[in-house]
Image (tube, rainbow, N blue to C red):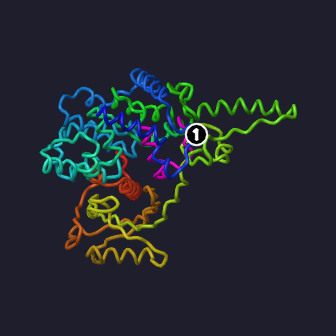
Amino acid sequence: MAGKRKRVVKETKSKKSPLKKSMNICSKHIFSKPSISQIRKELLSWYDANQRDLPWRTIAASEVDPNVRGYAVWVSEVMLQQTQVATVIPYFNKWIKTWPTIQTLAAADLEDVYKVWAGLGYYSRARRLHEGAKFLVTKMSGTMPQEVEDLSKNIPGIGPYSASAIASVAFQKVVGVVDGNVIRVLSRMREVGADSSHSNVRNHLWSLANELVSDTRPGDFNQALMELGATVCTPQNPKCSECAVRSSCAAYSKVRTDTDIGALDSFLKKNGKKKSKSCSDVEECHLCLPDHLWKSNPQVTVFPVKAPKKKPREERVMVLVIDRENRFLLIRRPEEGLLAGLWEFPKIILTGDKDVNDSQDVLLNELTIEQSSVISRKHVAEVSHIFSHIRTTYVVEHIQVAPSLVVEDLECPTSWWNASEVRTAAVSTAVKKILDSVEKLLRTDHPKKDSKA
């Protein structure tokens, strides 16, 4: 592996970056050999003194069985996608206690997997973990691959980042990692001022990460780089004065230099002199930050540059909370698509020409619930919830039905659960918000009697 790494570094140095053939890149976007050695030393020293005590790190550092190490890092990386570390820790501990090995997870029922995951959101992550474990047991005798290529190609749900993180942290393979934290750190260190979501820019960041990674402690180094981004080189209000590698950070240097230049400009203006204009060492470098962006925010926080976020799509949905003696009807979603396999209240999308009452009747008819079984209907509230790309407003309606009602012959599985069962089931946060609104209504309609009365 060490021989392969030397070859990668040599190629990167000769080509400057994978972008060189198609895009111009100036030298400030590349790490020099002396700076690489310095950064490795400083960052690992900082990490040894400041790393957070995290359960998956403990397993990766102390566990003898490589399959258990790889499994623990894999679970942690999946949980940490779109979720903060503090939130993940109790979920990780519960998960590992419930399914300590790949084999125990593979044998688990998906419904139980969803229950343990409940509250973390993005439930497709839990499903992919389960699918991956079953694949490893049935196709690979429960043995976790150790190489990046084998991890990303063979196991469902493992992409380039997760594969590199598992390979380096669990198996000490000399490969870099690029996640959101690393993108931010590398973009600031090398003044990468192009849109970081662009594939060519992302390829360059991967090239930098592979150059920079320590060949003796790759797992610790990658975790140090991510730790730096999470705790010091943060999106807003970064702690530059506490950064162990600020002497190698081009963005930090640029801020300090421009502050000095600002004072110099004022002096030259008073004395009728002009300051010479600095320029890149290549014509029209495609990774340099546009001047107007720097002028609008002359701070390290201008890096990394991201494309403007698209506004989430607006959607109105009517939800029927069907109540049969304080047990609520839930329907299981299909196994593919958004919130795949989760349970939810019956719902129907409202369009401009659909009346709420008419929509209720349509949905009740689809549920095979006759009007004669409906005891009461009451509007509850409008509940808003934002998914990654959809802003949904739920128009919540409470429908009380006869105790004898039976719902059958539906395409999707159904179940009747009380409130506490709903909260511990595999449901989305939106479902819990809807349940909160209904319980608030029921408490108002049926207040507890005064015990002294």
Q: Is residue 398 magenta?
A: no
Closer to the camera, 214 or 24? 24
Judged left or right of residue 280, residue 414 is left
Q: Position of residue 405 (x, y in %)?
A: 22, 70
Closer to the camera, 414 or 224? 224
Q: Is residue 241 above or below residue 19?
A: above
User: Residue drawn at (26%, 62%), measured in percent from left and top?
Assistant: 335
Q: Is residue 448 above or below residue 297?
A: below
Q: Position of residue 317 (x, y in %)?
A: 42, 67
Q: Secondary structure at mark 1?
A: helix
Specify the segment rendered in magenta: 189-209
Q: Quadrant of residue 263?
A: top right
Q: Position of residue 279 (x, y in %)?
A: 67, 40
Position of the N terminus, as image quadrant, is top left
Closer to the camera, 54 or 327? 54
Q: Quadrant of residue 274?
A: top right
User: Residue drawn at (49%, 52%), measured in percent from left and top?
Assistant: 198
Within-10-Å neighbours for mark 1: few <14, some 14–19, many 20+: some
Q: Position of residue 445 (x, y in %)?
A: 39, 59
Hey, what amino acid is under mark 1? Thr
Residue that extends furthest to the front in the rendered view of this protein: 14
Q: Is residue 303 above or below residue 36?
A: below
Q: Is residue 328 visible?
A: yes
User: Residue drawn at (48%, 26%), measured in percent from left and top?
Assistant: 34
Q: Is residue 204 magenta?
A: yes
Total tally of numbered discs in the picture: 1
Q: Is residue 443 visible?
A: no
Judged left or right of residue 367, residue 268 is right
Q: Disc 1 designates what residue?
A: 301
Closer to the camera, 310 or 260? 260
